[in-house]
Amino acid sequence: MSTSTTSYPRLARESPDFAHWKLPVAAILAVLLYTVLVVGLVIVAALAVAASGTPFDTWFDTSDTDIALDDPGLLLFQLATIVALLPCVVLAVALVWRRHVGFLHSVEGHVRWSWLGRCTLLAFVVVAAALGLSVLVAAAGDEPVSVEAPDGRALAALLVVLLVVPFQAAAEEYVFRGGLMQLIGSWTRWSAVPVVATSLLFAAGHLYSFWGLVSVFAFGVVAALLTIRTGGLEAAVALHVANNVVLMTLDIMGVIDSSGEGAGFWNEVVPSTVMCLVFWALVEWSARRRGLRRRRAPLPAPAPAPAPAPAPSYVVVPPPPYVPTSQHPAPAMPAHPPVTPAAPQPVVPPNAPSYPGDPGVWGR
């Protein structure tokens, strides 16, 4: 059995009970579960819209556009369709590969709650400081900056953001930096492949202009690197939550526009990427101080199934009044061969592709 430790993208592959079909089947099952949940959400939304007297066609046509921060009901529906991804991913992996589902969270097999709390605090400080600085720079450049007093609809939308966005952001991380990262990482030898592939897919799921998509791609790359460097999803989830909550809150208050319209290289890509890199540096510093576990030790092989009990041997004795004599000794009990213990299973099955080792940036 290998004694090397395992980084996050390889947690699935470097497991004693790994099989290439498990995560792809879990992905298909997650899609089916998600389809059922979304259909249910649409039915519930249709009933609510019908009760309000709003034409459903008009309402539904606006539901696939930008995030509706000015419509609390539609905002809740849009976010709920994303939140539904979270239970689908976790449940699908649990049904297909129960032993592995905990390693979607981190290399320790569970959510590291204290680490998540520390990363969340750091993320809100960094994001708030970065966006506040951007607003000050815009004001200094004679761009109009104003704050609108929130009305009842704005307060309702703000409540939806505070309560639902953390789960929406976590759902996206569990899909892209969690399940997809490990699925792709189990089929390729280079850790850079799942980093780039998941970041491209993450950007493709957003309806932004070109530079807005570049910014989202860069965010996805940093989130993936954070996941690998910290051995779990907590830091990426914290950054995603803080970014979305602060952006949407400032948009509801009329300070900024979070739709991505007018995004350019200097006013969107550079500030967003610098913000992410600063957060990454602080996370690295905090992880070293904390002695965070970043990689997983080899797992023990699953316990072999117990050997079936040998069939009992019986001595046939005729009914009385027969009495055995020395001339008719009872047949001897047959000797059973000793049970040979099963050989230990390798960490990686023989059918798995070989990996040459981590490039330097993924070092331990």
Image (cartoon, rainbow, N blue to C red):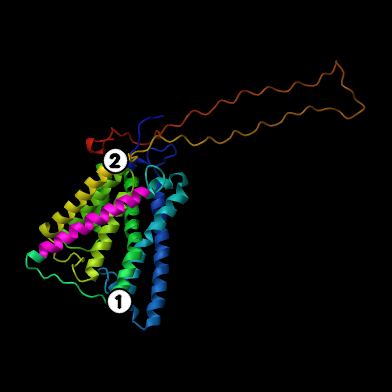
Q: Quadrant of the C terminus?
A: top left
Along the line of sight, the residue nearer the viewer: 70 or 203: 70
Residue 194 at x, y percent in the picture: 28, 46
* Residue projecting furthest to the left: 141
Q: Is residue 306 magenta?
A: no
Looking at the image, is 40 positioned above or below residue 89?
below
Looking at the image, is 267 positioned above or below residue 344?
below
Name which quarter of the figure residue 100 lies in. top left
Q: Which residue is mark 1?
A: 153
Residue 52 at x, y percent in the picture: 37, 82
* Disc nearest the viewer among 2 and 1: 2
Name which quarter of the figure residue 165 lies in. bottom left
* Residue projecting furthest to the top: 327
Residue range corresponding to the magenta coloring: 114-138
Q: Say which residue appears at 42% left-offset and 73% top-offset.
A: 44
The residues bearing labels 2 and 1 have C-alpha atoms spaced at a distance of 44 Å
Q: Mark 2 packing: few (<14 Cα in 10 Å), some, or many (20+)?
A: few
Residue type, numbered disc 1: Arg
Main SS of the magenta segment? helix
Tell me the element at label 2.
Answer: helix
Q: Which residue is mark 2?
A: 289
